[in-house]
Image (cartoon, rainbow, N blue to C red):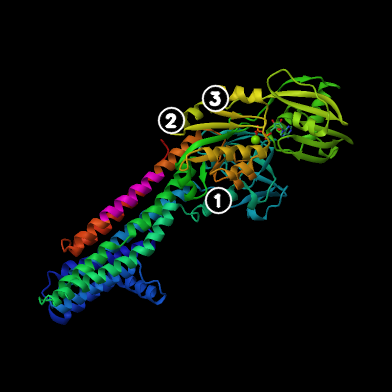
Amino acid sequence: MKKKQKKMLTRIIISAAMLVALNFIPVTGWLRMLLYMIAYLIIGYDILLKAGKGILNGQVFDENFLMAIATVGAIALALYEKSGDYNEAIAVMLFYQIGELFQSYAVGKSRKNISALMDIRPDYANIERGGVLEKVDPDEVGIGSIIVVQPGEKVPIDGFIIEGTSSLNTSALTGESLPREAGAGDEIISGCINMTGVLKIQTTKEFGESTVSRILELVEESSSRKSKSENFISKFAKVYTPAVCIAALLLAVLPPAINLMMGSPAGWDNWIYRALIFLVISCPCALVISIPLSFFAGIGGASKEGILIKGSNYMETLSKTKVVVFDKTGTLTQGVFAVSGIHHSQMDDTKLLEYAALAECASSHPISKSLQKAYGKEIDRNRVTNIEEISGHGLTAIVDGTAVAVGNTKLMEQLGIPYENCHSVGTVIHIAVDHAYAGHIVISDIEKPNAKEAIAALKKAGVEKTVMLTGDAKRVAEKVASELGVNEVHSELLPADKVTEVEKLLKTKAPKAKLAFVGDGINDAPVLSRADIGIAMGAMGSDAAIEAADVVLMDDDPMKIAKGIKISRKCLSIVYQNIIFALVIKFACLGLGALGIANMWFAIFADVGVMVIAVLNAIRALRVHNL
Ligand code: ADP
Ligand code: MG
């Protein structure tokens, strides 16, 4: 419990004790009044101050104002009636403060839980100087520096391992609890925990650009992106509070005025009392607090599973997803191609592979990585210049002074180089050297082990249509699609064609149904942003993906898509439950208050009770592990 909360608890106890005692001590007159006022001020002074400040700042109608006017009114009424019954005013404040305390405790606790989940921020980086390790601020480490990460420490900055092997715990990033093995040459991203060996890492980014920093930024920003439901609540509160105040005023004034006109006694105190009860009941805090908290808990729960949702608006859209469009390479397939044949080579096969690998040295496309891996030797980047990547086609470069082109048939056609067709099923990479056809390399990708299950899981989660888009050849595309059970497939698309396809799909779907595009962020940033909701996977490597997507899956497990949708559905259903629950109870109580059936005790119980239940319900959104 925080200091502030402890102080509040003390105030509650003192004031409550005084209230009970005063009902047994036979003091009367001014002394009695004074003692009651002390108890009232102990529990309520801050509310009165805030209400006063609100009035001065022109923001009159908030819950502090409601509480202040209701309790001050109750005291005034007691004075007027000379009843000396100040119990109600104090009790209302007491319960209100107990509710507030509970709420700040619960909200604080769930915020803490969520930040603990996101506890990936490294405090320092180790740099070796003269044989000793020195701890430095990760912000001060430049690109290309060598840092040392010892067992038990977090990797502070992205880079690659130059020495050592270890298992890495990536659970804070991906929700995946199995450790990952890594050794010299492997890329490593910040936020993992080094478990076993000492690693020397050469950094490839600055701290501010590293995965950890970007994720934290993203999570921090997520709370500022408001969903429709949240906007509804804040608009609602703006209209609601003044409306209730006016209603209360009318309730206090109109009936007595009518009574007077009819010639009967006005009954001012009765109606003012009802108006005050009305005000206490009307406090909208259950909604104002529980809705953002539900979203916050949902986003936190999802991030624990390695699903980063960039804002509650996306949470809302995701929950309505009915069409899921996939990129193929790296999304449904592993994006790790193995060479399955080299045909029509005009030179030694290894020489052809060497040209391809060298030309590809700077690309981050999965094909490029696979060709470099198949080549297997160290690549001397100095031999390559003028690299030009043409998305959806391939690339051109100058290798050892000779023009080299590596890509698909579209690229060859564009360059006007006649090529040989290939008869084996696979992704065919044509190569031209010095403007003449030099042969092709057939590579093939494998589907992700759970891609098929992931498609099935989506259907089970209520997704009506799955579509695969790819720049790859038709035969490969159709084979993958039918093996995975995807409903629709479009192949040989350029990145721009993918946007067109998605636009067509957006037009044909039902207006309320939402379309999600899932890609790896390579070549598909335009589609990611065009879809109702863009989901990037395997984001631990690609910056473009983190940037362009609305939802980021930290690892490349396609099962996470269905999981994300289920999490968002749960979160949204909690939000709706809270809205409906709070409003129904509120309006029912307001009715009872106006009819004079509810007294102030009832009012405060209804208010605090609804708030407590709504907050507890909101916290449920955090529990998503078993969805
Ligand atoms: P996908 O839809 O499968 O993700 P892309 O749009 O990234 O495909 O690429 C489509 C096609 O363009 C690939 O199948 C390949 O033939 C060619 N291509 C793209 N980038 C490269 C590259 N770096 N090297 C060779 N070919 C490439
Ligand atoms: Mg792609």
Q: Which residues are magenta?
A: 571-585
Q: Report the predominant secondary structure element of the magenta stretch.
A: helix
Q: What amino acid does circle 3 point to? A: Leu
485 displayed left or right of 106:
right
Q: Residues within 10 Å of mark 3 (few under 14, many from 20)?
A: some
Residue that mark 1 sits on? 218
Q: Position of residue 322 (x, y in %)?
A: 47, 37
- Distance from Cα at disc 3 to Cα at disc 2: 15 Å
Mark 1 residue element = helix
Q: Position of residue 189 (x, y in %)?
A: 62, 42
Residue drawn at x 85%, y 21% is 348
Q: Say which residue appears at 31% left-offset and 50% top-offset.
A: 580
**Of pointers 1 and 3, the one earlier in the residue sequence:** 1
- Say above or below: 244 vs 192: below
Q: Is residue 136 visible?
A: no
Q: Secondary structure at mark 2?
A: helix
What amino acid is at disc 2?
Lys
The amino acid marked with disc number 1 is Leu
Q: Earlier in the sequence, mark 3 or mark 2?
A: 2
